Amino acid sequence: MSDGKSTKSRPKGKGRSKKEVNTFYGLLDKPNIRRVTLGKYTCDTWYGNAAYFNSNDWSHSMLGYEYSNKIALDPSVKRKSSKSFSSTGDTTTTTNNNNDSNDNETKDNSLWIDQLYVCEFCFAYTMNNNEFQKHRACCTYRVYQPTVGRLVYRDDTSSSPYIIREVRGFQHSLFAQNLCLFGKLFLDDKSVYYNIDYFNFYIIYGIDNTDDAQDELFFKPMGFFSKELLAYDNDNNLACICIFPPFQRRHLGSLLIEFSYELAKLTPGQYYSGPEFPLSPFGKVSYLNYWSKKLATVIYAHLNDKDTFTLKDLATWTGFRKEDILLTLEYMKLLQTDNHGNVQLLLGNFQLFCKEHNIDPIQEKSMIKEDCLLI
Amino acid sequence: MTVQDSAESKRKLRSNDDSSRIANTALFNFDNINQILYRDKSITVTTELSFTNPYVYNGNIDINKKNSTTSKVSNVQVTHDLIPRRSSKLNDPLDPSIYDIFHKKMKRDERIMANEDRSRILSEVDNLQSQLQLLHQYDWIRYLPSICYINNPQDYDELEQKLALTITELDKLIRKHDNWRRRNDALNNEIKEFDTGLRHVVIEHDEYTADIATLRERRRVERRKRLGPTIRLKLHNGYTLIIDPIHPPTVL
């Protein structure tokens, strides 16, 4: 599951509709790239990404870097590609020569290219399979243990070791830009791909246990989350989060969410923190599940023998923002208003919620191992 | 509308280019504050089980409904192409330089968009500062109704109370902006030092071989160097003020 959320280049929820936010890159209701190959995996994309393309190339017959490079060599290419724009203003279906499709569905006019190839280590991208395979052989990021950025989590104690590395956008620009571009294929709302100087990226690497013995076993990127360092709301500990489709269903989203809170505990101004709002549908599911499990443990530990409490108490015990706590308590259906307008927390409802959701509030199950944190 | 909501709605409206919408709704409103959220009102604990009169905060949080957005199918397939052997003679067809022109252009365009947003925020902050100045004048009573919602303009008690609340809220918003500006300046300096070669990426050659405890201690020292130490201020009245660079200050 991809826990989609938005990154932003400007404050969100400030009267801007989704259409306005995406005006710069165009609003794409459907995927414009049919399939993407990440290393040895090929899968359908979930959402469109116009940022891979140059907005001057209305035919979308090539990727943005190819178009820009061709223009640089021969400016007359720009005039020729403008002429290919149809008089109705609609983009035409393009089936690039390098993308042979056997599927009749490419008649869908929303598709710009059939297949994109992305390096699984550095996220370099191309439409050409030959270039992609040659690059895989000589990619400098293809090493057993990744060295990009800084190590911030090292779990080499379990049978499924994981590594998290912190990559600063301004120090590894191309890597971060390519990562953002690839992530957008599985995120519904994202607006920053290139101006990433003010973002940190936290990439989780794991061993792909489906690799053949012939392949060298490398730690591969399996997902990431980004954090905006200059968010106006300094209590945002996460901008967007994405677990790549081949590596979903491993609870890596939960691990990254937990990590984001551990990181926030050591970040000035983020004593109480949470993800950037508004949450995407995936983000809402992931976070409400995470918050409710954590709150269940805290409620059991602290409130069973108390008569009253405040949201600030819960915030102090969890590190969550009060707004996020209130949202979760509402989701768990634990709060009731009495005739005088006072609010009550119902422990009976709490026990029922735990039972229905298989939550054991006595034992807090954590994906993250605190001893492995290197922040 | 809560204070925070009203403050944010003010910013939201002022961010909107449609000037006709900037109207009476851009006022602080302290009458309908969410007490448990912003005034830390106590919540009582009972052992009951009941679903009548549920407390509504957001109202739209049913995540059990299946919809197309959360039920995406990836159709992942695996190909077992053999990767060509590494060779020093092999040129990388996806060398970083091929992306230079396009990525630089796109970064420039996105930066322009970000700067437009910054300008809007700065203009809003200017507004807030002007409002604060007006409220500190002797004739504040003339300006308060255009900044804060007043139920009864003849009720001087209400006016005084809301003057204090509005000034506190404006101070808080301006301090938030100052905090952002300090972070902005610090990060820009860091980026500038990196671009000019004054600051380099630190490479830890033993990050996978050293034991975790060693690495954690190294991180702790780096953090202390970056953020500064914890300060304990012993006051003459028997109390001690603890100022931590990360946690809120506490008094012992």
Image (cartoon, coloured by chain):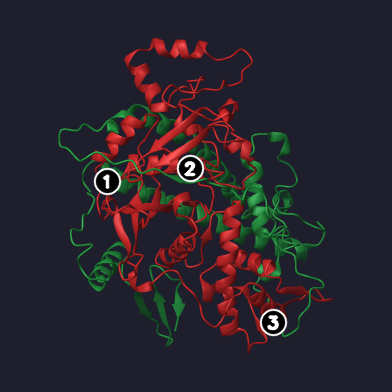
Q: Say which quadrant the C terminus of chain B sits in.
A: bottom left
Q: Are marks 3 and 1 on the same chain?
A: yes
* Disc 1: CA contacts within 10 A as few (<14), some (14-19) or many (>=20): some
Q: Which chain has been coloured red in this picture?
A: A
Task: Report the front residue among A291 and A137.
Answer: A137
Three-letter residue code for mark 3: Leu
Residue marked by disc 2: A43
Of discs 3 and 2, which sits in the foreground? 2
Three-letter residue code for mark 2: Cys
Three-letter residue code for mark 1: Tyr
Q: Are marks 1 and 2 on the same chain?
A: yes
Residue A226 sits above or below residue A352 on the image: above
Residue marked by disc 1: A141
For the question of whether residue B38 can be seen, the reply is no
Residue at 58 percent across and 84 percent down: it is A302
Residue marked by disc 3: A347
Of discs 3 and 1, which sits in the foreground? 1
Return the disc, 3 or 2, that comes first in the chain's sequence: 2
> Pointer 1 indicates a residue of which chain?
A
Return the disc, 3 or 1, that comes first in the chain's sequence: 1
Task: Report the front residue among B245 and A173.
Answer: A173
